[in-house]
Amino acid sequence: MSILVLGGAGYIGSHAVYQLIDQKSDVVVIDNLQTGHREAIHPEAKFYEGDCRDIEFMRKVFSTESIDSVIHFAANSLVGESMQEPLKYFDNNVHGTQVLLQVMQEYDVKKIVFSSSAATYGEPNSIPITEDIPTNPTNAYGETKLTMEKMMKWCEQAYGIRHVSLRYFNVAGARESGEIGEDHSPETHLIPIILETALGQRSHITVFGDDYDTPDGTCIRDYVHIEDLIHAHILALAYLNNSGKSNIFNLGSNQGFSVKEMIETARKVTNRVIPEKLGERRAGDPSILIASSEKAATILNWHPTKNSIEKIIQDAWNWHLNNPNGFNKDVSNE
Ligand code: UFG
């Protein structure tokens, strides 16, 4: 029996595939390679290139492979873009999940682990954020993730498909052994942009506002190491395999760091000059997002071991130093 990973060529999905293969699971990957990288797919995974909205393609995969459970990462995930093109997000994220659930129902696959987001909460009214606070997304991306969660809830009632929804906070870092890392185009995330500046690929990092209600005025986020995050998915699969009921868990480190603290730490870790400039606030940025991951600790027995920001930045830095052009090894062909 295999585990199907949708979006297994993306940043988070590819790290999941590597860890699943580390623990000797059989892995089938589906990815349309719109944002993922062929080079990020583990060579031992069985790869199908295609789109989860294409029901005939999906049926072909489910009828060829013996699929036991699904981990679903395939989605568009840029908050800013989701405000410009919300229908793209509803189509790929919501409709894609609808087709996936339809095919899971047809082929009697009853377990799914799903990548959700802290963006489902919007601007939280209390910190740290627990799973029971109201969900009130402030962007279309978060709305699609919440809609996907709701769709799964109804599919459980109707078809008995059990799900674990994992609400990520700020995922960062890279696989410790260095084969894969983060490579988005365009890059919008803080740590890769800081490290591209350290490499001299950017002249400076722009700090998006220093007038927030935080000690140094810059936004505070909860950074979680990608390998710890993926371990939670493996625990979530085990939970479903042990007949666990559908559930939602936050995945963060329970600690917050400001944008300025992240830049300062990156200067120490890389020992490079990282010029910064102050810019305008970025629309839609909440001032403080910090998770309570107590529930994942208690129920999934999830205890992150790599969540110092030095470690997260160090592993990301190793990847950036060794792969300054990401997965594109031959930039002369650009
Ligand atoms: N930031 C800068 N300069 C930059 C880039 C980011 O100051 O060049 C700041 C942002 O304003 C924010 C912090 O760094 O305060 C982190 O920004 P990221 O873009 O790295 O991450 P976000 O917190 O915006 O987004 C993350 C995930 C999203 C998810 C969201 C949930 O990347 O997918 O958390 O709130 F939707």
Image (cartoon, rainbow, N blue to C red):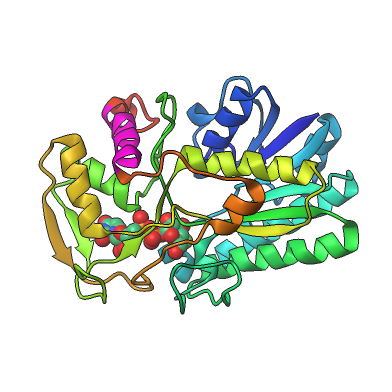
Quadrant where the image shows the N terminus = top right
> How far from the left and from the top, in percent, is residue 20?
62, 30
Residue 260 in the image, given as x and y percentages of width and height: 20, 58
Q: Which residues lie in the magenta part? A: 310-321
Tell me which residue sits at (65%, 60%) in the image.
248
Find the residue positioned furthest to the front.
Answer: 298
Q: What is the x, y in percent for residue 164?
A: 69, 53
Q: Nearer the viewer, residue 187 or 262?
A: 262
Answer whether residue 115 is visible to the viewer in this image: no
Predominant secondary structure, magenta span: helix
Q: Residue at x 83, y 60 (%)?
A: 156
Residue 115 falls within the magenta-colored stretch? no
Relative side of 324 to 247, left or right: left
**Image coords of residue 98 (percent x, y):** 75, 58
Say above or below: 131 vs 310. below
Ligand 1, seen in the image, is in the quarter at bottom left
From the image, which quarter does the C terminus lie in?
A: top left
- Is residue 142 shown to the viewer in this render? yes
Please indicate whether residue 238 sits to the left or right of residue 74 in the image: right
Q: Quadrant of residue 5?
A: top right
In the rendered image, which quarter is residue 220 located in?
Answer: bottom left
Query: Residue at horizontal 13%, vertical 35%?
Result: 271
Of the pair 168 and 290, the residue shown nearer to us: 290
Q: Is residue 182 above or below residue 40?
A: below
- Residue beneath the point at 49% across and 27% down: 39
